[in-house]
Amino acid sequence: MIYDLIIIGGGPAGLSAAIYGLRARLNLILIEKMAVGGQIALSDNIGNYPGFPSLSGVELMQKFEEHAKGLGLNVVYDEIKDVVDDGQYKTLRGVNENYKAKTVIIAVGASPKRLNIPGEREFTGRGVSYCATCDGPFFNNEDIAVIGGGDTAVKETNYLAKIVKSLVLIHRRKELRAEKIIQEKIHNAKNIGLELEHAAVSVNGTKAVESLTIENVKTKEKKTITVKGVFIFIGIKPQTSFLKNIVKDESGFVKTDPYTLMTSMPGVFCAGDSRSKKLLQVATAVGEGTLAATSAIDFVCGMC
């Protein structure tokens, strides 16, 4: 079978694209390698998605999935290994089988790089976070720690310092790697402390984060600091390594046309956190899924 559209990825962008594609009566499927929902399903509480002041990531994505399936969405569980341009159609090479479509939307998302220390995964969504914009307001007037030393870590530190009671920025090197101009704000803030040449070794707590143990990288001396939140900013990894024939930026995010979200391969679009852009949020993923779907609809109509 040759589909009008195949969507790769079942997160906010992919499900939004599916809703618009199904409403346009496209013959489409959504391919997901694990579970529908994406990274946001790991979030314990979302407070910045319009219309839902407070709900979990799982609850929000269940609503997305129910909406799409109510329109007839067919989810196929497979892992796509490559997307090939065969001229009029695109071939998606999966582990289980191959698929053909007139258009494709890549919505595979990205995942934060993890420290892989004890307690990190256990307390993700219960004090451990990778998104200041998403979770910062939940730590109003609390003590927190931020881990990282690059531009993102320092920018997010400056943002979080306006919300929390106190903040400790932890970086394993002797100096921060961020631009000097944004470092200046840290040094001028009264509620920000620095622990340079230190690495986090464990996140501690019972039901939620209660403290963080750090270690001096030279002396190996350890100490534990009391915090309610641990924000980790050591990088983001897009799930795009399988795309061998599509142009990506130096970090692996897919480059697209800003107006249509088409990639370097005609008829293939990209939406959500796997796309090269500034902001990674549910709201932006939804908007991009919508735009990619309408662009795919126009592309299919142009083939008629």
Image: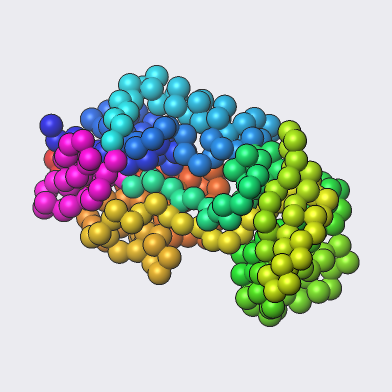
Count of numbered tags: 0
Tell me the chief SS of the magenta region: strand
Q: Name the quadrant containing residue 187.
A: bottom right
The x, y position of residue 302, in whole percent, is 19, 45
Q: Quadrant of residue 207?
A: top right
Q: Is residue 130 left or right of residue 267?
A: right
**Residue closest to the eye, 286 or 131:** 131
Q: Quadrant of the N terminus?
A: top left
**Residue 32 drawn above or below residue 161:** above
Highlighted magenta segment, given as a residue range: 79-105
* Residue lying at 40% horizontally and 60% vertically, measured from the top left: 253
Q: Residue 239, percent across and down?
A: 39, 51
Q: Is residue 300 visible?
A: no
| Residue 72 placement (x, y as % from top left) | 33, 21
Asked if residue 80 lies in the magenta stretch, the reply is yes
> For the point 54% across and 43% down, which residue is it?
282
Coloring applied to the structure: rainbow
Q: Which residue is most to the top?
A: 70
Check residue 57 for magenta coloring.
no
Q: Looking at the picture, does residue 296 appear above or below residue 148?
A: above
